[in-house]
């Protein structure tokens, strides 16, 4: 377990390596004992020192980015306490203590999870690296070459074929739809921030190519909707294994086992889990997701 130097200012229990390798943000790279992440037009850096303390830096400077990105302003003890009556999640909190939700740049998060449709983490990373390399800005940090995340305008000006050349395939149309809606003003980050969960999700679902899971990931990881509960194949399996008693319909339980949910079933399951876990359901989701992949020995 690692504590930051600012421990007196906020609750700072953190396992950063676990956190950046938990399927939330995809543009982190390791160089020896140092980690670098692309965050909008910044390159973030953390390293683990010999005394097990953490060193944080950013290029250009983004003050206290670790507090923002690792959500160190969340009262994690209080959040953990809310799940004490749930034997599954409370045990996962102990097992993976230090795993944090990450607060992402909303636009980057939208593009990242647009790339996540029907693929694996390795492919998501590759698509995003290709987009950064083709449309981002080249920069040098610690004698290493990085590319910042493409601006909205750069992706909006790109053709579908240019986006496809980055390996995005049919997802290129979703990427194009997102950036066009942002540029036109039809989709504004500020408005999404200030909407409640249902309103914000409805707006995201109106964008071509954004479905329930992608919308919930965007809401959870970048728009402060911590009650969001994204459901993918891993979460479906976890719900079948640990929470099937919450679902009365046999067909729904069978669909959780086979991981095939219709849009309506997704809505039902998501609502049940948000009611079960409460306003911090997204924390429970992340621990369940991480646990299922760890148990299956899947690479991050």
Image: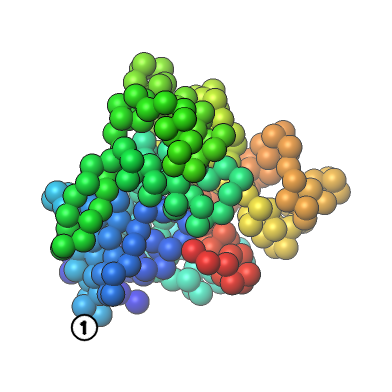
Q: Farthest bottom residue? A: 51
- Residue shown at 27% from the left, 48% from the top: 147
Query: Which residue is label 1 attached to?
Result: 51
- Residue shown at 51% from the left, 74% from the top: 95
Q: Determine which quarter of the picture holds residue 53.
A: bottom left
Q: Farthest right residue? A: 250
Q: Relative to 207, does residue 217 appear above or below in the rendering?
A: below
1 or 129: nearer the viewer: 129
Q: Position of residue 48 (x, y in %)?
A: 25, 74
Q: Determine which quarter of the picture holds residue 49.
A: bottom left
Image position of 180 (left or right of 90) = left
Q: Position of residue 122 (x, y in %)?
A: 50, 57
Q: Relative to 3, does residue 102 appear above or below in the rendering?
A: above
- Residue shown at 51% from the left, 28% from the top: 173
Q: Position of residue 228 (x, y in %)?
A: 52, 43
Q: Determine which quarter of the picture holds residue 264.
A: top right
150 or 55: nearer the viewer: 150
Q: How is the image coloured?
A: rainbow
- Residue shown at 73% from the left, 42% from the top: 261
Q: Position of residue 46 (x, y in %)?
A: 24, 65
The answer, for residue 129, to whether it is visible in the render is yes
Describe the element under mark 1 as helix, strand or loop: loop
Image position of 169 (left or right of 232) = left
């Amino acid at each position: 377990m690692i504590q930051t130097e600012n421990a007196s200012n906020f609750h700072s229990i953190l396992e950063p390596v676990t956190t950046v390798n938990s399927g939330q943000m995809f543009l982190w790279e390791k160089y020896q004992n140092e980690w670098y992440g692309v965050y909008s037009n910044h390159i973030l850096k953390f390293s683990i020192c010999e005394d097990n303390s953490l060193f944080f830096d950013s290029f250009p400077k983004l003050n206290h980015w670790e507090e923002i990105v690792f959500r160190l302003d969340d009262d994690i003890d209080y959040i953990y306490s809310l799940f004490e009556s749930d034997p599954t999640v409370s045990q996962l909190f102990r097992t993976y203590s230090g795993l944090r939700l990450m607060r992402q740049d909303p636009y980057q998060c939208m593009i990242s999870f647009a790339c996540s449709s029907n693929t694996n983490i390795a492919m998501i990373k590759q698509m995003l690296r290709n987009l950064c390399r083709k449309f981002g800005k080249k920069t040098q940090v610690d004698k290493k070459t990085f590319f910042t995340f493409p601006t909205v305008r750069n992706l909006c000006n790109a053709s579908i074929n240019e986006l496809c050349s980055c390996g995005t395939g049919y997802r290129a149309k979703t990427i194009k739809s997102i950036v066009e809606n942002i540029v036109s003003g039809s989709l504004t980050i500020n408005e999404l921030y200030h909407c409640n969960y249902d309103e914000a999700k409805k707006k995201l679902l109106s964008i071509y190519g954004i479905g329930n899971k992608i919308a919930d990931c965007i809401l959870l990881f970048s728009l402060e909707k911590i009650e969001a509960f994204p459901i993918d194949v891993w979460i479906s399996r976890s719900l079948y294994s640990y929470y099937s008693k919450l679902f009365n319909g046999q067909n729904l339980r069978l669909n959780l086992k086979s991981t095939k949910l219709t849009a309506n079933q997704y809505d039902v399951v998501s609502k049940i889990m948000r009611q079960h876990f409460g306003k911090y359901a997204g924390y429970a989701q992340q621990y369940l997701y991480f646990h299922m992949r760890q148990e299956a020995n899947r690479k991050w």
